Amino acid sequence: TNQIGSYSSRYLITLLISTMKVAALTLLAGSAAAFAPAQTGKASTALNANFIEGTKALPFGSSPDTLDGSLPGDVGFDPIGFSTSSFASFNNPLYVEGNFMTDLEWLREAELAHGRIAQLAVVGFIWPGLFGTFPGSDEFGGVDAYSELNPFKALTTVPESAIYQIIGGMAWIEYNRVIRIKEQGANRIVGDIGVGYPGAWNPFNIEYSPEDYADKQLQEIKHCRLAMIGAFGLICQAANSGTDVVSQLSPAFAAPEYASKAGYFLPQGI
């Protein structure tokens, strides 16, 4: 039994590490689809869309006419043509003909889901090196269980129950999102996870005007896109350097010993 448990643990850790590395490609794919936002109307995506020369995103290239600039974050960036394809119904068990999000809204749903995860990932990569880690205990994984700063190596040092806790939390949030997608159907509020959206749980009683709400949507989309790019860079950095980004960059900002001595403005020996 102990051998089976040990094998299962090693398999889970190996799977998580492999998943984090593959996530880099997933984030890129999500960020590509992310720039094809949803329309406010419920019209279906045109499969035979025309490409219009010139975009706000780039000084060259073209964009499909399915991107009309009516949504926050729409700058016409879709060189591959994601916004012209039928993604909502493709291999999607949640899809209900006539009562589901449009193809563009489905892409926006993916953008927000990937972007929010990426934002959490970026914080998780940087926070331990800047502010420290949780204390460990002999009864729960050991005193150094949470001291590893490299995210890949940390998967092998934290208690298994901590990993299961994270997986369980993510699964619960995703489950509730799927339930809302089914319940809202064609009237889906894209990205709604039951917190902060109109009619949802609002613990801080934040009320926005329509203009302010649109501005917050634009801010979130920008943060999501930056975080997806940032998470990809952090994954590559950790995988190739073997250390966390804070430890790797800290020496670049450290002052040499002679700089703290009065009257010494040049390295000793010059």
Image (tube, rainbow, N blue to C red):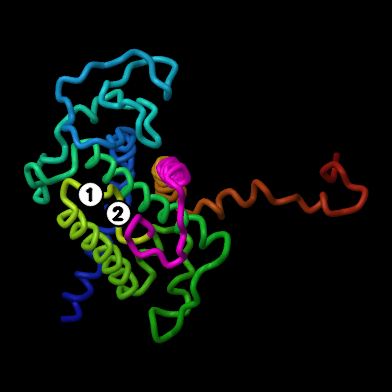
Q: Secondary structure at mark 1?
A: loop
| Residue 106 appears left or right of 52 | left
Where does residue 250 sit, x and y in percent of width and height? 62, 52
| Residue 54 appears left or right of 105 | right
Where does residue 60 sit, x and y in percent of width and height? 40, 15
Kindly identify the amino acid type of the residue bearing the numbered disc 2: Asp
Quarter of the figure that contains the N terminus: bottom left
Q: Along the line of sight, which residue is nearer the eye, 152 or 49?
A: 49
Kindly identify the amino acid type of the residue bearing the numbered disc 1: Arg
Q: Along the line of sight, which residue is nearer the eye, 97 or 243?
A: 97
Q: Along the line of sight, which residue is nearer the eye, 208 or 137?
A: 208
Task: Look at the numbered discs 1 and 2 and tell me whether their residues touch, using CB distance below 8 Å.
Answer: yes
Where does residue 10 sit, x and y in percent of width and height? 25, 66
Q: Looking at the rendered structure, which numbered label has been put on residue 65?
A: none
- In the figure, residue 167 lies in which quadrant? bottom left
Q: Is residue 236 visible?
A: no
The structure residue drawn at horizontal position 27% and vertical position 21%, both measured from the top left corner, is 65
The structure residue drawn at horizontal position 85% and vertical position 43%, both measured from the top left corner, is 269
Quarter of the figure that contains the C terminus: top right
| Residue 228 appears left or right of 187 | right
- In the figure, residue 130 lies in which quadrant? bottom right
Pointer 2 local density, CA inside 10 Å: few below 14, some 14–19, many at least 20: some
What residue sits right under mark 1 in the picture? 188
Q: Residue furthest left?
A: 97
Q: Give the vertical position of 153 relative to 136 (above or below).
A: above
Q: Secondary structure at mark 2?
A: loop
What residue sits right under mark 2 in the picture? 192
- Could you tell me how far apart the alpha carbons at marks 1 and 2 are, in whole angstroms? 8 Å
